[in-house]
Amino acid sequence: MRAVDLIHKKRSGESLTAEELSFLIEGYSRGDIPDYQMSAWAMAVYFQGMTAEETAHLTLAMAESGDQVDLTSIQGIKADKHSTGGVGDKTTLIVAPLVAACGVPVAKMSGRGLGHTGGTIDKLESMAGFRTELSREQFFAQVNEIGIAVIGQSGNITPADKKLYALRDVTATVESIPLIASSVMSKKIAAGADAIVLDVKTGSGAFMKTLEDSEALAAAMVGIGSQVGRRTAALISDMDQPLGYAIGNALEVEEAIAVLQGNGPRDLLDLCLALSAHMVVLGGQADHLEAAEVMLLERLESGAALAKFRAFVAAQGGDPAVADDPGLLPRAPVIIEVIVQQEGYVLHIDAEQLGLAAMMLGAGRAAKDDAIDHAVGLVLKRKVGDSVKAGDVIALLHAREDSPSVEAAMQRVREAYTINGNKKPADKPLLLSVVTAEGIKRF
């Protein structure tokens, strides 16, 4: 078997077998297949696509390139959630304890933020003492004891995917749905969950900008899950404006705690309930979504979900008192008002620009090894559909006094808002569609 023959075969629009894809991935991982041949193959995939079966075979080959976590020692059907990345997306901090409070174990590996999207691990580390590195024995024992653990991704999970993604990033082959889908799902499969719920973002603050592309990606990922025997569903959610009001690590933890306390933003709560309901059904604790939502609301109202969050934080070395007093979280020394002079309604918010503004303040990282400031970020005071008049505050910047980027961040926030006219825009739904093995259903 030769790489050049497989490149030619894919370039011609033919399908590759499981053995051929394993040969490519194993050879590339070992260094036997050079970058120039793998980039030629990736470009062939970009133009010719892959069948669902091919994509599943590729996913398994990448999952098998490194460590695979065996969760069989954890009781029950283990559920995981993955977001394709967005601005203000702190759903894991709410969903994980909420689902665990319903009896579905959550054994989750999460990543750090890069660019304008935040990372769950960075948010968790906003809490002093919180440990995101546990041994496998500690990880398993904690899930069996309290039903939840969230840790950073192992260094040897899907090394082939890391190597291939770095190549795609410099060869203009990132925007290939089969390659994106296999990249995401290889990590989820290697992490060992029985059930996977995907939150696929669409819009200005998302990687996939159109609903059609987002649904295609979701369908590809659900197809992979079905092919490899994992219970999988995907929700398409709007990211044309940030989720909730807070952007930045400690600020987002505070907002997540507000939801668990019963005081959080409605859009954030609604998305968390939808994701959690699918996890509870796939995890075998409810027969249908309506019953799952009733169960979830009861766990919120009774305080059981907040108690689970408190136990989770304590188990991983953080101060559980933060669940009752978010003032214990890091605080930026100055809060700066962003004021506008326009009048009318907020018609649109460019979520990506707000994410970049928070990054400029120090809340995110441009490169993988950059340090971040957990205290800084921004809190929105107006969202789409809200009315504004000259002199109104549209956002608060939480910043360092000596930050050289404050003025530029303020300008970026102003430019992210489109304010015009005297007619309130029509409400846009947060949840746009759901994708399961049965197909796509739009709301």
Image (tube, grey):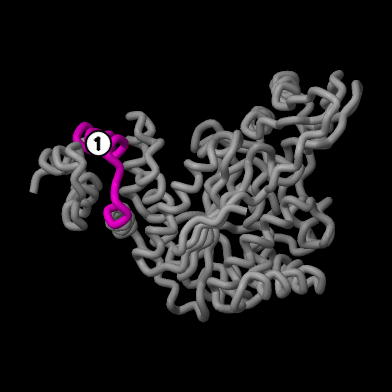
Magenta stretch contains residue 288: no
Query: Callout 1: few (<14), some (14-19), or many (20+) C-alpha neighbours within 10 Å?
Result: many
Please name the residue that numbered disc 1 is placed on.
44
Residue at 62% x, 57% y is 92
Residue 258 location, quadrant: bottom right
Residue 357 lies left or right of residue 38; in this view the side is right
Principal secondary structure, stretch drawn in magenta: helix
Q: Label 1's element?
A: helix
Residue 387: x percent and y percent? Answer: 87, 32
Seen from the viewer's position, the closer of residues 141 and 114 is 114
Residue 335 lies left or right of residue 79; in this view the side is right
Query: Is residue 135 placed above or below 348 in the rendered structure?
Result: below
Residue 183: x percent and y percent? Answer: 39, 49
Magenta stretch contains residue 44: yes
Q: In the image, which residues are magenta?
A: 35-54
Residue 182: x percent and y percent? Answer: 37, 51
